Image (cartoon, rainbow, N blue to C red):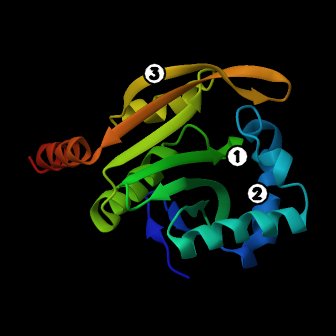
Amino acid sequence: MYSISLGDDGAELSPLEPWQAEDFLAHMDRGREFIGQHNGLPDIVTDLASSRAFLQAYAERAAADTGRIYGIRTDGTLVGAVIFRRMDVGQGTAEAGCWLEPAAAGKGLVTRAVRTIIDWAVEERGIHRVEWWVSAENGPSIAVARRLGMTKEGVLKESYLYRGKRHDQEIWSVLAPVWRAARQGAQATSGR
């Protein structure tokens, strides 16, 4: 399997596949309560069969070019993931998402991983617009959207029913020309 370095701390990004269901379930078990604060995945991935089914669904999305899932690993341990929940290459749109177990939070892993997959989507797949849908109560995820240079486009009031409570969802996005300009600006600054 291949992986991409996420920096000097040894963190890596690599595709997650159905054969890794046991590892994925162990990761989910370690972070179940923390991840489940804003993400319904822990309610879906509860045993080995559901873990395999979740990863298989993403393998099918990857094969159809409609979605992707990548694991974030530190010291070889799966600690989180970033996804394209949906991709429409014909329309040039994608929706990114993420989660981490608590031990991996606060280290910039998600920001670095999402930068990597947005770069790929924009430069390799021709995606024009990347969206980030987030619970208005999920401060860390909103902070990632800001660090990525996304713009808040609006709030869908009480649009997401989760564990018996209605939540507002914020929609953030970045367009390919804005993404490229920000990346070029960052490269020019770091080259000085």
Disc 2 element: helix
Query: Please, which residue is most extreme toward the top here?
Result: 157
Examine the rendered structure and indicate whether residue 148 appears above or below residue 159.
below
Q: Position of residue 143 (x, y in %)?
A: 47, 29
Instruction: Specify the amino acid type for callout 3.
Output: Gly
Q: Is residue 54 above or below residue 56?
A: above
The residue at 55%/37% (across/down) is 106
Structural distance between the alpha carbons of marks 1 and 3: 28 Å
Q: Residue 27 bears which disc, if any?
A: 2
Q: Nearer the viewer, residue 60 or 187?
A: 60
Q: Which residue is mark 1?
A: 101
The local secondary structure at tag 1 comes to loop
Residue at (49, 62) in percent of width and height: 10
- Residue 108 in percent (x, y) is at 48, 43
Q: Earlier in the sequence, mark 1 or mark 3?
A: 1
Image-based side of 141 in relation to 111, left or right: right
> Taking the image as drawn, is residue 55 in sight?
yes
* Residue at the bottom extreme of this rendering: 1
Q: Are marks 1 and 2 in contact (CB under 8 Å)?
A: yes
